[in-house]
Amino acid sequence: MIDNTHADAPVAVVTIDGPSGTGKGTIARIIADRLGWHLLDSGALYRVLALAVISHAVDFEDINSITTMAEHLDVEFKPSGDMNMETDIFLEGEEVSKSIRTEEMGNYASIVATIPSVREALKSRQRSFRQSPGLAADGRDMGTVIFPDADLKIYLTASAEERAKRRYKQLKEKGLNVNIPALSREIAERDNRDASRTVAPLKPAEDAEIIDTSDMTIDEVIQQIGLLLEARALMPKV
Ligand code: DC
């Protein structure tokens, strides 16, 4: 007899949500790489949309035009091909990997992300990343809205001070000009907007595993997630 038990089993997904500066992006990338899975950096979609709004000189109050842009957003993610597992991101054929990473663009991304019709327009695009053999998805609402049936939901937190320090280091390494007091203010403002919006606010899913990374290294966080993956039989044996 043919065993069809798993024939229609959905592709495995691990979601990693939390505010900025918790290490989400780096951790999602390492997990995707270790498991040989696809990666969804959902924040990059909102950042690219914000950049498109600016480059087409659309008003941030013009919800109809921004929604239409979200529906037709010409964005492409390509592995950069070098050893650091980075992804090159293209908007309308032009590389924007670096220009979308500024704090300013994070802030604009958080503004367009409050628009319910924009979030709706980007849903199916995000879900289309769920392809065999699996997906690691990072964002704010991956476990609550986009992949509510995820196999493992992680919610990362860290103290505001530690997150500001990490963002500072990250942005400096990318050659961007920042200072800690201004960065702390911007982060607090953005987190507040992300957590208080009416649709898909930043919050842990009820069934999420919450990890406070304030005093942890990236390796320690990965180790802890590794145990959770193993417990759910998602980790390939090496
Ligand atoms: O993760 P990030 O810093 O690149 O995200 C930029 C902004 O995009 C974030 O402040 C809020 C928004 N965002 C969102 O609303 N939902 C997501 N799943 C990911 C990002």
Image (cartoon, rainbow, N blue to C red):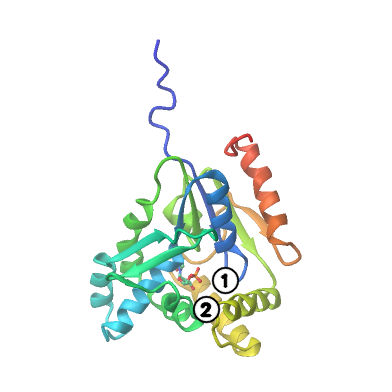
Residue hosting label 1:
20
Q: Are marks 2 and 1 in contact (CB under 8 Å)?
A: yes
Q: Position of residue 56 (x, y in %)?
A: 26, 82
Q: Is residue 195 above or below residue 177?
A: above
Dot 1: what SS? Answer: loop
What's the residue type where badge 2 is placed?
A: Arg
Residue in front for this viewpoint, 204 or 107: 107
Quarter of the image containing the N terminus? top left
What's the residue type where badge 1 is placed?
A: Ser
Locate residue 108: give its quadrant.
bottom left
Residue hosting label 2:
190
Callout in the foreground (2, 1) = 1
Q: Position of residue 100 (x, y in %)?
A: 43, 76
Identify the residue at horizontal 48%, vertical 60% (top origin).
141
Q: Is mark 1 within 8 Å of ligand 1?
A: yes
Q: Is mark 2 within 8 Å of ligand 1?
A: yes
Q: Is residue 75 left or right of residue 172?
A: left
Few, some or many residues within 10 Å of mark 1 (<14, 14–19, 20+): many
Q: Is residue 58 left or right of residue 12?
A: left
Residue furthest top in the image: 1
Q: Is residue 124 above or below residue 50?
A: above
Residue 86 is marked as none
Q: Is residue 219 left or right of residue 175?
A: right
Quarter of the image containing the C terminus? top right
Locate residue 49: give its quadrant.
bottom left
Q: Is residue 8 above or below residue 26?
A: above
Q: Is residue 14 left or right of residue 69?
A: right
